[in-house]
């Protein structure tokens, strides 16, 4: 691989340069859904409160709110930097941050209304990871500090943030709506118009919980993805996060409008959400990505493996997620993890280094390496990461 000015110039058999024995180079993985601060809950919420023996997404959410309530610009920056450093050491070279903690705990703006969003961006720059920053619109529910008073005031913040991010090569700004729970019809329309006008990535949580679908049906008479279709929210730049309980009609809508789905299997499993209709998503040609979401675990191989393994548990078959003319699910899963088909000239040089001498891989034949990575390994085999051609994680960063 030849790299110049942070871009891949050429991929193919090397004629010159240094050959590194026992190492393989691969594209870095794209972490398409993150709430960095939630990493602080890791290990802390794996027990019930005896007074409330029924624990599920909604009780977990209360504990997440307690953590969110106490955040400051400094702690956001610090927690985010640690999270992103872990991502780089695990093989993720880019992250999409779904950022919804915007204001002071009482809901009033910081002196700089984008203080917390900028804290996230500065953390990404400090760690060296590529960032798609999605300020998230939140109209109702949640904590006061999540909410903006109107769409125009929210979009003014986005305008300012986009301007601030210009000239920051690792930072791109998009936009998101939290969910159909937190954002009503009129807001969805205005957010969609704004995103489509400026050709911005547009994300939303949808169909994560059955209760969310029941509430949407009783408020709007349609299911969440149908509401998104009616409000103009779905397009080629739109990503639906979770889609766990999407039905056939909703999946058809995603396919028709060219929208994508982001699966977060380790988090969805941890929260007891359920498992997305992966085979139906593949059948309809809906692009799929993965995210480590709450960061109960940060490991791209585990996210990808979970998708196929859950599809196997549900179907009683093996190699379920086969793209046309392929005989293994590995290429499909890797494309979902990379967000593309593999390294090619012109791509940013966002790469990871794999230790082929690691005990997990030491006996693996070269032709089986991709499947051994996806089905048999973890982030421990990653020993380096490059973003924009710069080394941002070396073996020493992983404790030797
Ligand atoms: Zn999320």
Image (cartoon, grey):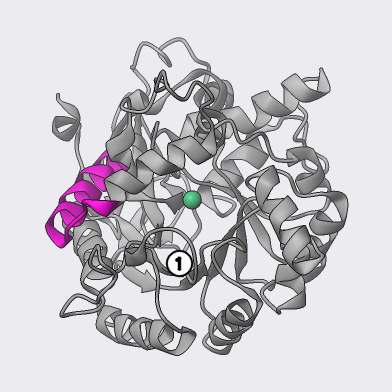
**Count of labels in the image:** 1
In this view, the residue in front, 211 or 94, is 211
In this view, the residue in front, 50 or 68, is 50
Residue 223: x percent and y percent? 77, 59
Instruction: State the residue at coordinates (73%, 44%).
Output: 245
Tell me the SS state at disc 1: loop
Residue 219 placement, left or right of 190: right
Residue 70 placement, left or right of 100: left
Q: Look at the numbered disc 1 and say if its residue's Cβ is closer than 8 Å to ligand 1.
A: no
Instruction: State the residue at coordinates (16%, 35%).
Output: 397
Residue marked by disc 1: 346
Task: Examine the image and state in which quarter residue 268 appears.
Answer: top right
Q: Is 325 contained in the magenta span?
A: no
Above/below status of 189 relative to 259: below
In this view, the residue in front, 240 or 65, is 65
Residue 147: x percent and y percent? 40, 70
Q: What is the magenta range?
A: 69-89
Residue 376: x percent and y percent? 52, 18
């Amino acid at each position: 691989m030849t790299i110049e000015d942070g871009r891949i110039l050429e991929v193919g058999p090397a004629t010159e340069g240094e050959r590194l024995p026992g190492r393989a180079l691969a594209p870095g993985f794209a972490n398409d859904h993150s709430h960095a601060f939630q990493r602080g809950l890791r290990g802390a919420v794996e027990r019930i409160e005896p007074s409330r023996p029924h624990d599920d997404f909604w009780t977990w959410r209360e504990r997440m709110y307690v953590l969110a309530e106490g955040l400051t610009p400094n702690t956001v920056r610090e927690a985010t930097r640690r999270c992103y450093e872990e991502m780089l050491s695990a093989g993720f070279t880019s992250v999409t941050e779904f950022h919804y903690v915007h204001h002071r705990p009482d809901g009033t703006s910081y002196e700089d209304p984008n203080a917390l969003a900028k804290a996230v961006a500065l953390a990404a720059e400090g760690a060296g990871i590529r960032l798609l920053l999605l300020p998230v619109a939140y109209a109702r529910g949640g904590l006061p500090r999540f909410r903006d008073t109107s769409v125009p005031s929210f979009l003014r913040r986005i305008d300012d943030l986009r301007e601030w991010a210009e000239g920051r090569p690792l930072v791109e700004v998009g936009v998101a709506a939290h969910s159909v729970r937190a954002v009503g019809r009129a807001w969805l329309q205005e957010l969609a118009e704004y995103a489509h006008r400026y050709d911005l990535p547009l994300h939303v949580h949808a169909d994560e919980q059955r209760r969310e679908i029941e509430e949407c049906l009783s408020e709007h008479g349609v299911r969440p993805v149908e509401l998104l279709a009616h409000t103009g929210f779905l397009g080629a730049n739109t990503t639906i996060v979770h889609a766990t309980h999407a039905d056939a009609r909703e999946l058809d809508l995603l396919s028709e409008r060219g929208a994508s789905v982001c699966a977060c299997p380790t988090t969805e499993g941890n929260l007891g959400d359920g498992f997305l209709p992966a085979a139906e998503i593949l059948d309809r040609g809906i692009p799929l990505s993965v995210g480590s979401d709450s960061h109960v675990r940060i490991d791209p191989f585990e996210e990808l493996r979970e998708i196929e393994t859950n599809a196997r548990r549900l179907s009683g078959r093996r190699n379920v997620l086969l793209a046309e003319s392929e005989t293994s699910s590995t290429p499909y899963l890797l494309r979902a993890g990379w967000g593309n088909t593999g390294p090619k000239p012109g791509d940013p040089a966002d790469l990871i280094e794999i230790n082929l001498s690691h005990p997990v891989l030491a006996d693996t034949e070269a032709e089986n390496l991709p499947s051994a990575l996806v089905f048999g390994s973890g982030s421990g085999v990653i020993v380096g990461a490059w973003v924009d051609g710069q080394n941002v994680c070396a073996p020493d960063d992983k404790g030797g």
